Image (spheres, helix red, strand yellow):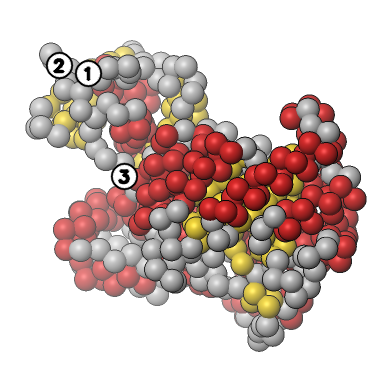
């Protein structure tokens, strides 16, 4: 393991979780969730937040404006960036989105590979250059900070790539972002592409003030390796997402690049502004809001990233942790319990432990978590940090509750039909009870909820995970539901020692998100059961 920092040059982190990450299949965030993630990204220390694609929809524009106004204020706040195709309408709308930030940025792009030119825009090389000239000139007339990306650079003719980059700089771009849009390149190749561009692009060489950036996709599992190769070649901006989420196989993951730079300072020889201790918290927030579970063996943030199973490894770890760990779990925000919490632990011990884990609660919040902790501690001998993190996720990341779960009761087994009775209440105090029969206990519960809420949807994903080992472990459930036309989807998360209850919480969270996002919250429940209907 390297130690000591030989820091001169800084690599800036451009986080695109809210834009490219939100393009993940199934991901969809409300504007309030985007704002909370943006706030957390600022705490994490990212330099630039790409908050969305303002021309995509009025909702996207409003969400970017909110991030610009509420997270992008003050000289120490991150730069707030919006994406725009190289067309006038997109660039003007993008500026509307970001202009209220203290440090706004317009990011415009055009596909430059022969494949994209031929099949997507139908442009010749010259028409591509004309479009870039117009777009970057317009963007630079509006914003002091402009980034240009030649999309599919990984498959673009190398000489044409130099020409478009030189033109973008001459028209006012300050950052040249080189995307491997389809995850096609290899690290050695990518290093040479970036080094060649820095060397040959007029007006953008060393000392010009132009920042070179890399944006890699993970189709061959090489996104992090390619990004680091770009850094070695001189790129000083990396475009990344939390947990590596994004289109298809995803983008480069922020935590992997940040920890590579932090763990091997002598090798990479660059500094950064990322506060690595915020990584795990950010990862959980993004996973829960997007309803995208992090695989257990995911580097840095997976549940097993610091778990040691083999006897020889455990033996080494007990003698000295450096035998099998190249970084400490604490350095990325995992913590190791010094206090063992159980059913005899009081409110104060819980408060202290939660503070050590980075959660500060007011009196009311602490009482709520304490009540849940007591129920859990009755069912489970030791409550671990992972259990507490799951409880906190469940409490903190709850959507606005149009329907609240009062009670759920299920009968299932080998005799008869699984039956569930659900009792929900609405904000105005009305209580609704419904019983339903299903193919299994979870199906019966979901049918009972559907009978009360009456919001047509399709369940497209359902997964259960155990937070820790053991028969008494806390279960985490993630679900994703879709509107009947398949246009929008919403995630939900629930944690409980009873997986049926966790399943109900997760489904109800997704339904509440759907109600909020579709603007159905004001619809008054009618008759016996509360009713909301799409299109009202
Ligand atoms: O992958 C890509 O090419 C992009 C661009 C818009 C930068 O996301
Ligand atoms: Zn991308």
Judge from the rendering whether residue 278 lies leftward or rightward of residue 137; answer left or right. left
Secondary structure under the numbered disc 2 in the rendered image: loop
* Image side of residue 229 versus residue 522, left or right: right
Check whether the beta carbons of the residues at disc 1 and disc 2 lie within 8 A of each other. Answer: yes
For image coordinates 45% across by 53% down, the residue present is 99
Where, quadrant-wise, is the C terminus in this rendering?
Answer: top left
Q: What is the x, y in percent for residue 227?
A: 73, 59
Q: Residue, x 73% and y 78% (percent of image)?
A: 269
Look at mark 1 in the image and give the residue it sits on: 531
**Rendered view: 407 above or below 2:** above
> Which residue is label 2 attached to?
526
- Mark 1 CB near ligand 1 (8 Å cut): no
Residues at badges 2 and 3 in contact (C-beta under 8 Å)?
no
- Please indicate, yes or no, whether residue 277 appears anywhere in the rendered image: yes
Q: Which image quarter: residue 456? A: top left
Q: For the N terminus, give its image quadrant.
A: bottom right
Seen in the picture, residue 251 relative to 524 is either above or below; the reply is: below
Q: Secondary structure at mark 3?
A: loop
- Examine the rendered structure and indicate whether residue 270 appears above or below residue 37: below
Residue 502 x, y percent position in the rendering: 35, 38
Structural crowding at the residue carrying mark 2, measured as other residues with C-alpha within 10 Å and reported as few (<14), some (14–19) or many (≥20):
few
**Residue 286 visible in the picture:** no
How would you rate the neighbour count of disc 3 (Cα within 10 Å): few for under 14, some for 14-19, many for 20 or more? many
Residue at left 35%, top 57%?
Answer: 70
**First reached walking from the N terminus: tag 2 or tag 3:** 3
Query: To which residue does mark 3 refer?
Result: 398
């Amino acid at each position: 393991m390297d130690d000591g920092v030989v820091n001169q040059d800084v690599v800036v982190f451009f986080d695109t979780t809210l834009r490219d990450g939100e393009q993940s299949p199934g991901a969809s965030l409300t504007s309030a969730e985007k704002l909370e993630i943006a706030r957390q990204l600022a705490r994490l220390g990212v330099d630039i937040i790409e908050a969305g694609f303002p021309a995509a929809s009025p909702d996207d524009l409003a969400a970017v404006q909110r991030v610009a106004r509420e997270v992008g204020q003050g000289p120490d706040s991150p730069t707030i960036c919006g994406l725009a195709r190289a067309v006038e309408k997109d660039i003007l709308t993008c500026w509307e989105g970001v202009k209220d930030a203290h440090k706004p940025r317009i990011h415009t792009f055009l596909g430059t590979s022969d494949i994209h030119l031929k099949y997507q825009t139908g442009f010749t090389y010259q028409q591509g250059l004309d479009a870039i000239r117009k777009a970057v000139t317009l963007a630079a007339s509006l914003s002091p900070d402009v980034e240009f990306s030649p999309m599919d650079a990984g498959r673009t003719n190398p000489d044409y790539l130099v020409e478009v980059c030189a033109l973008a700089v001459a028209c006012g771009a300050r950052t040249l972002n080189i995307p491997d849009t389809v995850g096609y390149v290899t690290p050695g190749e990518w290093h040479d592409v970036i080094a060649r561009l820095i060397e040959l692009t007029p007006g953008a060489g060393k000392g010009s003030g132009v920042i070179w950036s890399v944006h890699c996709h993970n189709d061959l599992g090489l996104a992090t390796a390619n990004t680091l190769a770009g850094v070695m070649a001189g790129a000083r901006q990396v475009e990344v997402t939390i947990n590596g989420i994004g289109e298809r196989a995803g983008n480069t993951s922020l935590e992997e690049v940040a920890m590579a730079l932090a763990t091997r300072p002598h090798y990479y020889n660059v500094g950064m502004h990322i506060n690595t201790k915020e990584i795990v918290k950010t990862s959980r927030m993004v996973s829960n809001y997007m309803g995208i579970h992090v695989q257990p063996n995911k580097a840095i943030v997976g549940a097993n990233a610091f778990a040691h199973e083999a006897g020889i490894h455990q033996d080494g770890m007990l003698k000295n942790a450096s035998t099998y760990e190249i970084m400490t779990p604490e350095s990325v925000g995992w913590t190791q319990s010094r206090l063992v919490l159980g059913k005899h632990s009081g409110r104060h011990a819980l408060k202290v432990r939660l503070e050590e884990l980075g959660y500060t609660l007011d009196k009311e919040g602490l009482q709520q978590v304490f009540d849940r902790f007591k129920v859990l501690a009755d069912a489970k001998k030791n409550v671990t940090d992972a259990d507490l993190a799951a409880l906190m996720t469940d409490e903190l990341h709850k959507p606005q509750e149009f329907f609240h779960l009062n009670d759920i009761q299920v009968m299932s087994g080998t005799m008869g039909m699984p039956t569930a009775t659900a009792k929900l209440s609405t904000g105005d105090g009305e209580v609704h009870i419904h019983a339903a029969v299903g193919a299994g206990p979870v199906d019966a519960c979901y049918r009972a909820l559907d009978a009360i809420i009456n919001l047509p949807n399709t369940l497209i994903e359902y997964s259960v995970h155990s937070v820790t080992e053991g028969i008494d472990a806390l279960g985490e459930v993630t679900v994703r539901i879709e509107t009947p036309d398949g246009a929008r989807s919403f995630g939900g998360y629930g944690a409980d020692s009873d997986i049926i209850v966790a399943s109900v919480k997760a489904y109800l969270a997704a339904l509440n998100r759907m109600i909020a996002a579709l603007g159905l919250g004001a619809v008054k429940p009618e008759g016996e059961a509360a009713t909301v209907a799409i299109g009202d």
